[in-house]
Amino acid sequence: MLELRDLHANYGEIVVLKGVNIFVRQGEIVSLIGPNGAGKSTVIKSVFSIAQVTKGEVIFEGKPITHKQTHELLKLGIVYMPQGKVIFSNLTVEENIKISGEILLNAEKLKERIDWVYSLFPVLKRKSRQLAFGLSGGERQMLALARALVISPKLLMLDEPSLGLSPKLQAELFSTISKIRERTKSSILIVEQNAKKAIEISDRTYLLEDGKVVLSGGKEIVKRKEIKAVYLGGRY
Ligand SMILES: Nc1ncnc2c1ncn2[C@@H]1O[C@H](COP(=O)(O)OP(=O)(O)O)[C@@H](O)[C@H]1O
Ligand SMILES: [Mg+2]
């Protein structure tokens, strides 16, 4: 479904990605882990043309989508949840959820999707008319996810969804991500600092270091010394 082929990307003069090869099949959860500054966020930002792709290709459903802009990708069903729970504090919970959906869906379909999202996050339903300003960290994360999910994305890209959450909320978040995969046919690409949890819920995980994939594989890679080095080294 998504394939990054020999992706090279820069910010101006700064070279960040040095030939990244990654693929995500339909319905898969794939994680990208690695130390701070490795280029994980840049992988997602390259797909969205926020970082400059200088070489290589982004392929989605067999077609090249390199250099496409956010609104074009949204129409194709690719949604990006940036690092840091970006929500509109001065809008209500429901207004936040509606934002991307209003452009792409008719009123009836939107209502149906909002109900579906509320079934996944009942707390958001209870607080639908409150300002997002008053939400807790965990609830803000749910809201950011709800907003991404409302348009039934084919491909959901999440940048550090567990960042700043308590261990209990992290566990809930990861089980929600697994639930999303079970209930939809969406493919999910996650950038995660919690390497162990990411590997646990993923079909495949890529370890990125200094702009290159240095290791990839299924759940068995949790035992590899490179992975242990990443989280024992405290580089997160
Ligand atoms: N907007 C930017 N302009 C210049 N350099 C950037 C920008 N964003 C990130 N970088 C640099 O690119 C490298 C990779 O960053 P990033 O992809 O955010 O890493 P990660 O998500 O793995 O922590 C880092 O060295 C960072 O300083
Ligand atoms: Mg990052």
Image (cartoon, rainbow, N blue to C red):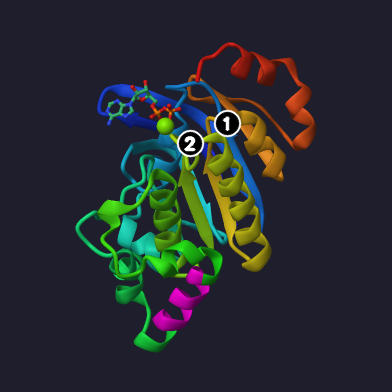
Q: Along the line of sight, which residue is nearer the eye, 155 or 150?
A: 150
Element at badge 1?
loop
Q: Nearer the viewer, residue 8 or 179?
A: 179
Snapshot quadrant of residue 95: bottom left
Report the quarter where the N terminus lies: bottom right
Which corner quadrant of the image does residue 130 belong to?
bottom left
Which of pointers 2 and 1 lies earlier in the amino acid sequence? 2
User: Does the stretch in magenta take in 193?
Assistant: no
Q: Position of residue 144 (x, y in %)?
A: 39, 54
Mark 2, secondary structure of its residue: strand
Amino acid type for the residue under numbered disc 2:
Leu
Disc ID at residue 194? 1
Circle 1: is it few (<14), some (14-19), or many (20+) Cα within 10 Å?
some
Q: Looking at this rendering, what residue extends furthest in the top direction? A: 233
| Residue found farthest to the bottom | 108
Q: Badge 2 is on which residue?
A: 7
Report whether 116 appears left or right of 124: right
Position of residue 122 relative to residue 4, above or below, is below
- Classify residue 149 as left or right of residue 172: left
Nearest to viewer (mark 2 / mark 1): 1
Q: In this rendered view, identify the residue nearer to me: 60 or 157.
A: 157
Label 1 amino acid?
Asn
Q: Residue at x 33, y 71 (%)?
A: 98
Residue 103 locus on image (x, y percent): 30, 74
Q: Main secondary structure of the magenta part?
A: helix
Q: Is residue 140 above or below residue 234?
A: below
| Range covered by the magenta-colored residues | 110-118
